[in-house]
Structures are given as structure tokens and as C-alpha cells.
Amino acid sequence: MTTKDLIIQTLDRLPENLWREVLDFILFLLQKQSKLEVLESSENLEPIKKPQFIYDRDRLVGALVNAETFQQYLAWQQQQNEPADNLSDRLAELQQACKEENYTLEVSPRVDRPNAFLEILE
């Protein structure tokens, strides 16, 4: 069984389009660092309990995490990319709540405030 096959087995919980991207990225990093020997034995492919960091000359370039953690990250990322509620949506929500509660906003009559500029001109 090849290293690629072993990695595919560990990533089988992810949707196909995601695990292929993750697999290609991991293999690229490992080949770049000439560390494929780390994945040669099946003992190294047991579920990851904590992130395993990948460095390039003391610079963090990646991390291996378990599939569940990666799924949580993807869900969080999707949530962050969702557009925030805008003011008009919030006002419509407030208006609907007021209708349901039969609430009317009491508006006081308009009153002109003193205008210092006009007083100077007089």
C-alpha cells in the first residue's frame, strides 16, 4: 500500500473535493521538506490527537489535524464568510415584532429648537 493510499484512508470522512485538495497539499509540503519517511509506516497514521505542525526553516507552513477538527474549521470558515445582517433586515424584523405585539410607537409632535445663527441675524 502506498503512502498516498494510507493518507486517503485517513481522510475518507471528508467530502471528496476537500480531501483531494488536503491530500495534494500535504504531499506537496512533505515532498518539499523531504519528510515522506514519516508517513511510511502505518503506525504514524493513527488518529491525530493534537495538531502536528510542519515547519520550513523555523517558519510554520502547515499543520496536520484530525478530520473532525478540520470539519469544525471548515464550518467556522463558512460561518465567517456569510454576509452579516444588514440594518434593513434588522428593521424589518423589528417592524414585524411590533406588528405581532400590536405595539405602536408614540411620536411626540415636532418642535423647532432654538437656532443661534438666526438669533444673531435678527
Image (spheres, rainbow, N blue to C red):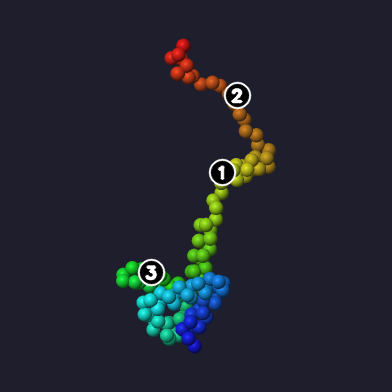
> As rendered, which of 19 and 65 lies closer to the eye?
19
Residue in the image at 35% along x and 72% along y:
55
Left or right, 106 with reference to 33: right
Other residues around mark 2 within 10 Å, as few (<14) / some (14–19) / many (≥20):
few
Give percent across and percent down for residue 120: 43, 14
Other residues around mark 1 within 10 Å, as few (<14) / some (14–19) / many (≥20):
few
Task: From the image, tell me which residue sits under label 2.
Answer: 109
> As rendered, which of 43 and 7 lies closer to the eye?
7
Q: Identify the amino acid type marked 3.
A: Val
Residue in the image at 39% along x and 84% along y:
37
Give percent across and percent down for residue 65: 45, 72
Residue in the image at 48% along x and 80% along y:
7
**Which of disc 3 and disc 1 is earlier in sequence?**
3
Left or right, 106 with reference to 121: right
Q: Nearer the viewer, mark 1 or mark 3?
A: 3
- The number of callouts visible is 3
State the CA–CA distance, disc 2 to disc 3.
64 Å
Disc 3 secondary structure class: strand
Above or below for 70 versus 112: below
Res. 66 mark: none
Q: Identify the amino acid type marked 1.
A: Leu
Q: Nearer the viewer, mark 2 or mark 3?
A: 3
Give percent across and percent down for residue 89: 60, 45
Q: Nearer the viewer, mark 1 or mark 2?
A: 1
Left or right, 39 with reference to 100: left
> As rendered, which of 101 and 58 lies closer to the eye?
58
Q: Is residue 78 visible?
A: yes
Disc 2 secondary structure class: loop
Task: From the image, tell me which residue sits under label 1.
Answer: 87
Res. 61 mark: 3
